[in-house]
Amino acid sequence: KAEQERDGHCAEITRLHNALRSLENDQQDQEEDLTIEVDDLYRDLADEMNDKETYYNRRVLSMEKDVDSLREEIESLEEEKDRLNFDNENIVADNECLAEEKNR
């Protein structure tokens, strides 16, 4: 009878040991799955951030080009303004000379 009880206890211990091993394996599998999921999420987030950074870098570059273009246009307009002022001054001077000649 004692031997039967001992065998029953051994069988229960073996069953519990197997159940514990199974739970540990399940836990390890879940940890691996979570690690893979977190790695995938991190990779997706990093890709998304890189995409946004690339987009914003392109926008900044485009805006810098626009600013440079506007500066060049302003410079060209200022040169044209100076030329027109010079031409206007010459016309005014010529008109004054003609008026003086007419009055003689």
Image (cartoon, rainbow, N blue to C red):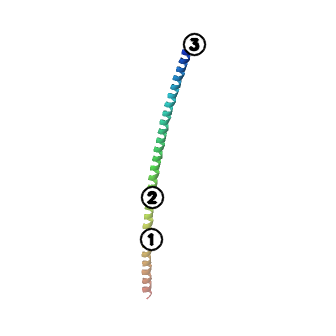
Secondary structure beneath label 3: helix
Up-down: is 56 above or below 88? Answer: above
Q: How many residues crowd mark 1 within 10 Å: few (<14), some (14–19), many (20+)?
A: few
Q: Tag 1 or tag 2, which sits nearer the N-term?
A: 2
Residue type marked 2: Glu
Q: Tag 3 or tag 2, which sits nearer the N-term?
A: 3
Residue type marked 3: Ala
Residue type marked 1: Lys
Question: Could you say where residue 21 lies in the image, as x and y percent from the top left?
Answer: 51, 26
* Front one among 104 and 46: 46
Q: Nearer the viewer, mark 2 or mark 3?
A: 3
Q: Residue furthest front?
A: 2
Q: Tag 1 or tag 3, which sits nearer the N-term?
A: 3
- Which residue is denoted by mark 3 in the rendering? 2
Which quadrant holds residue 82? bottom left
Secondary structure beneath label 2: helix
- Which residue is denoted by mark 1 in the rendering? 81
Residue 91, numbered label: none
Residue 64, numbered label: 2
Q: Nearer the viewer, mark 3 or mark 1?
A: 3
Q: CA distance from mark 3 to mark 1?
A: 116 Å
Residue for point 52% across, 30% down:
27
Q: CA distance from mark 2 to mark 3?
A: 91 Å
Q: CA distance from mark 2 to mark 1?
A: 25 Å
